[in-house]
Image: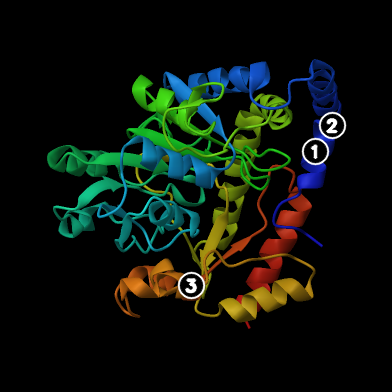
Amino acid sequence: MIPLLDLQTQYQSIEAEILEEIKDVLRSGQYILGPYVAKLEHQIAEKVGVTHAVGVASGTDALTLALIAYNIGPKDEVITTPFTFIATAEAISRVGATPVFVDVDPTTGLIDAKKIADKITAKTKAIIPVQLFGQSADMDTINQIAKAHQLVVIEDACQAFGATYNHKPVGSLGDAGCFSFFPTKNLGALGDGGVVTTNNKAIADRIKQLRVHGSHKKYYHHEIGLNSRLDAMQAAILLVCLEHIDHWNAQRRNKAKRYKQHLEGINQITCLTEAKDNRHVYHLFCLKSSNRGLIMQALRDHDIASAIYYPLCLHLQEAYQFLNYKLGDFPNAEQLSETIFSIPLHPFLSNEQQIEVINVIKEVTQL
């Protein structure tokens, strides 16, 4: 099988480094927060180009805590995209606010910044652009709109660690950035984890308080918080991975370039576009085809993995029926959900494996 992502090979490539770090954590006796998390936070902040990074238990918690820290809650509206993983909207719902969806650009899958202004009401408090599949939305336009309407911008950068927009790192482009360290992410742990990045000290300090049950002094609780602490073991593993992330992302970009060279212009296939001013890090490499099922079956027949991200837009999910959206409300997102699929791409994908994927796709599309 040629997998979408080869976590076993990735682990083997840094096994000695990781095991040494794990031993150090075990010897330290400090397993929750502590010096390893503090070191990771410092290095993440430096890498992203912000003054503060706060480690939390997951990317979903990062989004939730950022919203709480900006006092977004019941009766508020937050604008985002319907073409993303549910965690984006789920975090909005968890704080009691209402997600308001905006359609996407059909060539990139990213939120269409030009359509945001029309959805702003007196209840709108924030925009959450999703830096989907490894690249950034049009943050210049989004920030201009946000400034004009005094809105908070929280980047859902969970799929885009290491990407840049206008030469600035994703995660530094809004008021706060939220990353996931789920194992399949470009920068992934060996379990759950996340981080919030910001240049706002007050927001960083509040998230630090919120992540430990609303407390900044043990057993003294200043507000209702969460248990959302990043553990030291995952922080130590991420410190190792952080040393390799630039090389891994460069490998992803090289392999994406090869796919495009061979697949662009082929009948029945369209590659998603790398948006203007972006340095895409290809968390996923996605294609569009009206014959998606036929192509994916051919890949399966040759023991090649593929997957659909995402098969049903958020506005059509059962969980969001109460918002009263209907089929046809966001045609670009809906069309993508019916045609998009991803093929293997990761730093350890061999040239031979990649050519095999390309040949199968070429063969089935020329039938």
The answer to whether the residues at label 2 and label 1 have Cβ atoms under 8 Å apart is: yes
Q: Earlier in the sequence, mark 3 or mark 1?
A: 1
> Which amino acid type is marked by label 1?
Tyr
Instruction: Single out the residue that lies furthest toward the front.
Output: 219
Residue 188, horizontal then vertical, whole percent: 66, 39
Label 3 residue SS? loop
Image position of 11 with respect to 39: above or below? below
Residue beneath label 2, please? 15
Name the quadrant containing residue 183: top right
Instruction: Determine if residue 160 is in view.
Output: no
Q: Earlier in the sequence, mark 2 or mark 3?
A: 2
> Which amino acid type is marked by label 3?
Leu
**Residue under the image location 80 percent in, 38 percent down:** 11
**Nearest the eye: 279 or 31:** 31
Instruction: Determine if residue 134 is in view.
Output: yes
Name the quadrant containing residue 237: top right
> Which amino acid type is marked by label 2?
Glu
**Residue under the image location 31 percent in, 39 percent down:** 71
As measured in the structure, the alpha-carbon distance from the residue carrying label 3 to the one carrying label 1 is 32 Å
Q: Which mark is residue 11?
A: 1
**Residue under the image location 50 percent in, 58 percent down:** 85
Name the quadrant containing residue 9: top right
Residue beneath label 3, please? 312
Label 2 residue SS? helix
Q: Which mark is residue 190?
A: none
